[in-house]
Each structure stands twice: as structure tokens, then as C-alpha cells.
Image: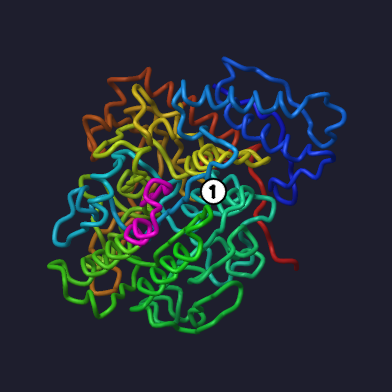
Amino acid sequence: MAGVEIFTLHGGKNKLSTALLQGGSAQFCDHFVIFSKIVRTHTGILNLPSLPCSNYSRWKMTYTTAARFVVAGWFLSVVFGNPGAAYSETARPPNIVIVFTDDQGYGDVGCYGAKGFATPSLDRMAREGIRFTDFYVAQPVCSSSRTALLTGCYPNRLGIVGALNPKDRHGIHDGETTLGELCKSRGYATAAFGKWHLGHHPQFLPPRHGFDEYLGLPYSNDMWPHHPTAGKNFPILPLIEGSKVVKEDPDQTQLTTMYTERAVSFIERHADQPFLLYLAHSMPHVPLHVSEKFKGKSSQGLFGDVIEEIDWSVGQVLATIQRKGLDDKTLVIFTCDNGPWLTYGNHAGSAGPLREGKGSTFDGGVRVPFIARWPGKIPTGTTCREPAMTIDLLPTVAKLIGAALPERKIDGLDIWPLLSSQPGAKSPHAALYFYWLNRLDAVRSGRWKLHLPHPYPHPEEPGGDAKPGKIVTQKIELSLFDLDADIGETTNVADKHPDVVAELQKHAEAARAELGDTATNRTGTGVREPGRLPD
């Protein structure tokens, strides 16, 4: 059901501000905000009008009445069992931890069928929480994927596609709302550690977009002079803290450990307040690097060692949360930015049963592992087979912490019913769209995925040992796949289901109208400009 927001107080970029009212009215508004966050998800029961609270004297409502509303809201939250809306005046909203890895494939986690290395911490998360089998990123490449996760928008809506490089002069626009800003609106401490890739100039970095702390690489770890084929195009790789370069050409064998130590410290320092931790590991993007403590540990060589160190990092985060008594107060999510970069051979991961990898809109490029854990809120050992996407995380977090959605249009939808395994929960999307840059390649609805005619990269001769192999361009014509029966997208059944093809083509046309499509020379009406450096 659509929600009702009783009132919202804005300040700056869609941030909730303190109500400065007279004669005890701030306390009144505090209670009323709590109640409004509850009833906005139950509009079938209470459909209240919007009430401005900027001038309490205009509204002849007593504190006693407001308190009764709070009690009524509490009653509704108990009756309807909505964990994301059960607020009280003293309730602490949940901590949010998102671990996001780089180029880790669908088959690169133990509980997704990984071979040659172990991921006990991630497997534990799956046993103690939920694992999604059909979770997607918006595009199979770095900046695009991260933009979608952090803003809830298809990246081409925001004008950020592909992988931004050190020569680019654009990035995330100040008018967009990130997960950091969303959580800051509710008083959260926020931190981002690891790869950013939404623009490397100061105006695009995390401190300008809702994150109190930042340490990491501003773009991919291969954008440096040691790149095997394009090194002359890149400057020295910078390690940035806040908005300043603190080291050039950092020791990449220490990145995973460094990010993890910062994450642990952040949790320890903010255990007494709600926090958002975005831990975006640079690995296992090539060039692969691992610390001495994990070197040679796996039977799959360097790639396996790197994954085992990432799993150790997840274990350190979970252990810190448990040690600080925050288990039942913390939602932990693990997922990846796209599929494996198959052209790198033994330095690439595995897409498991899926077709192709990074750079492709076949499922091997866009379907990724997704695991979530929140004791007491997410049932243990559950599996979700409904389609969902990284664009859904921002609106889901907004629901859970009681934050207003961004004023600008977003594409994601609340998937808490899926995360919490509510009976009969279905994907909230009629369709999910898969673009390569600004070209619409595919549409998924339910079990069906329609590929529109498009070229795609295929690794003809995989490379190895940090060197890429040979890529050839292949092309797929209009093709329909039944992903329930054919996870590898091998058998075109378009001739057998013309009605399904027609329906998915309608969804594709809706995407073109809103987001554009270079394949058909369409400009979307909903596309916005990215942030740009002044000329």
C-alpha cells in the first residue's frame, strides 16, 4: 500500500531538521513523527491528512492527544507485526552494514557453490539469515553499479555509466540523495571504507555526500601506471582519507586489512548510536593482492586467497557487532558490484551456472550473491527466489529507519517483505531493466528474461596471472529465456511464448520513454544530469 507521510521537516539536501517550536511543541512533534512513521504503512486503516507542524499554535491538538496517537501507533505495529515500522519514542533504529565486493562472481561464495576456497563467515551469514538466488545489480560495471546501490536509481537516470576514470570531470550530483545522507537524516554516524567510484574530485567524494568518515581508493585499483595494457593512461593511484590524498601508490596487499581495521574501529566507536557502515572492498578486482596472513592458504591460488581474506573481513565485522552486543540491532548485507571479469582467467572468479560475466547483461554479468543477516528480524536459513536489485536497498533502509524517501524520483522499491520472509511476499517490480551504459539490453519480469538485439563481449581466450585474454564481440537477437528452467540462458523460447515477448516489449518501451535507449535513439524524459566540475 502507498504510504502517507503526515509531515516532514526538511533541511539541506532532504535531511530531517529539528522542530524548533514553542511551549513544549517540539516534544509533541517528536511523538507525532514517531506515530506518523508507523501509520504511513497502514493507510488502509488510517488515512490521515498532511499536517504542517512548523507552527504548533495553529493546531489545537494537545500533548495528551499526541500521546494517545503514539499508543495507537504502537498497537498497530504490534497487531500488524511490521518490524520496519515499530518505533517508540526511545527506540533505536537499526544499524546498517553493507559489505560490497568488486568483481566477485555468483559462484564465488561457498553457499553459492564455490570450489577451491572456503567462505565460513559468509556461509554462517546465510545460515543465520537469508540468501537470495535472483539478486541483481543495475549494470555489470563499476561506477554504474555503485551509483545504483547508493542512490536507489538506475545509473543512466543519473548520468553515471561505465567506469569513471581519473580524467573524468563528472560524478554524483549534489542534488541526489545517497544512503549516507538518508541515514544522516535520522542522526546516524556514517562511514565509507574502500572503493568509491562516483567521482574522484573533492565535490564528488563521500564527505560531500553523507559520510562522516572515508578511507579508500576513489576508483578501481587497476587505474594506475602498472596496468598491463593501459598504464600510460593513468596517474599514480591515490589513497584518500576524507577528501585528501594521504598516500600515493599504497601497498595493495594491505587494503583489505586496512579497510577492515577501520570498519571495526568505526563500529566500536559508535556502538552507542545508530550507524551506517559501507565497506566496499577493492578486491577481488584485478590486480589481485592479498596479505601475508592469507597468501597461499587456498587451493585455488591467488584468487582463492583473496576471497578467503574478504571472508575473514566479514568475520571480523560480525565478531565486533556481537562483542558490542549489537547483533539484534544490526542488519548486515553482503553483495557484489557485478559478475567476474572472465577475461583474466585464473585471476577471475566464477559465474557458476550463469552465462558470461562482467560487461555483459546476461545473468553472469548482473546476477550476484546476496546475503542478509539480522537476528530476530530475518528468519534463519531462508532462501528468497524473487527478483530484486541493488536499487531496492535505499528505499528498504528508508523504511526500516523511518527516513523520508528522496525528493527526486528513484527506481528502487521496498523489499523488506522479501528480506523478512513474509508469507507470500513477491518482488515489488513489474519488471527489472538491464542497460549497458545507455543501451537497453534486457528486461526481466518474473521467471522471464527478454534480451533485445545487442552485442556483448565474450572471452574467446582467457588470460591469466594478471593479464587479460582475447575478447570478441558477439551478438544476440531477440531472445526469451525461462530462467526457472534455464538458468544459463541457453534456449530461446520466444517462438513458444509470443504473449510473454509482447508483454516484456511493453516494459522495454516504458523504460525507453523514461530512461532512454541509445539502440533506438531514444532520450528518456526522466534522465538527470550528473554533477560536473566548472569549466
Please tell me whether residue 141 is drawn above or below residue 194 in the rendered image: above
Q: Which residue is mark 1?
A: 155
SS category of the residue bearing label 1: helix
- Left/right placement of residue 139 relative to residue 448 reads right
Please tell me whether residue 184 is drawn above or below residue 34 in the rendered image: below
For image coordinates 47% across by 50% down, the residue present is 95
For image coordinates 35% across by 39% down, the residue present is 376
- Dot 1 amino acid type: Pro
For image coordinates 22% across by 72% down, the residue present is 302
Q: Nearer the viewer, residue 319 or 248?
A: 319
Question: Which quadrant of the rendered structure holds the N terminus?
Answer: top right
Specify the farthest residue to the top.
45
- Left/right placement of residue 368 relative to residue 410 reads left
Q: Nearer the viewer, residue 215 or 487?
A: 215
Q: Quadrant of residue 226?
A: bottom left
Question: Which quadrant of the rendered structure holds the C terminus?
Answer: bottom right
Q: Nearer the viewer, residue 356 or 418?
A: 418
- How many marks overall? 1
Q: Position of residue 345 (x, y in %)?
A: 23, 65
Q: Position of residue 88 (x, y in %)?
A: 56, 36
- Left/right placement of residue 60 relative to residue 243 reads right
Query: What's the coloring here?
Result: rainbow
Please tell me whether residue 123 is drawn above or below residue 464 in the rendered image: above
Q: Is residue 319 located in the magenta-colored stretch of the structure? A: yes
Specify the farthest residue to the front.
64
Q: Nearer the viewer, residue 76 or 481?
A: 76
Q: Residues within 10 Å of mark 1 (few under 14, many from 20)?
A: many
For image coordinates 17% across by 75% down, the residue present is 296
- Left/right placement of residue 296 relative to residue 21 reads left
Q: Position of residue 233 (x, y in %)?
A: 49, 77
Q: Is residue 110 located in the magenta-colored stretch of the structure? A: no
Q: Which residues are magenta?
A: 317-334
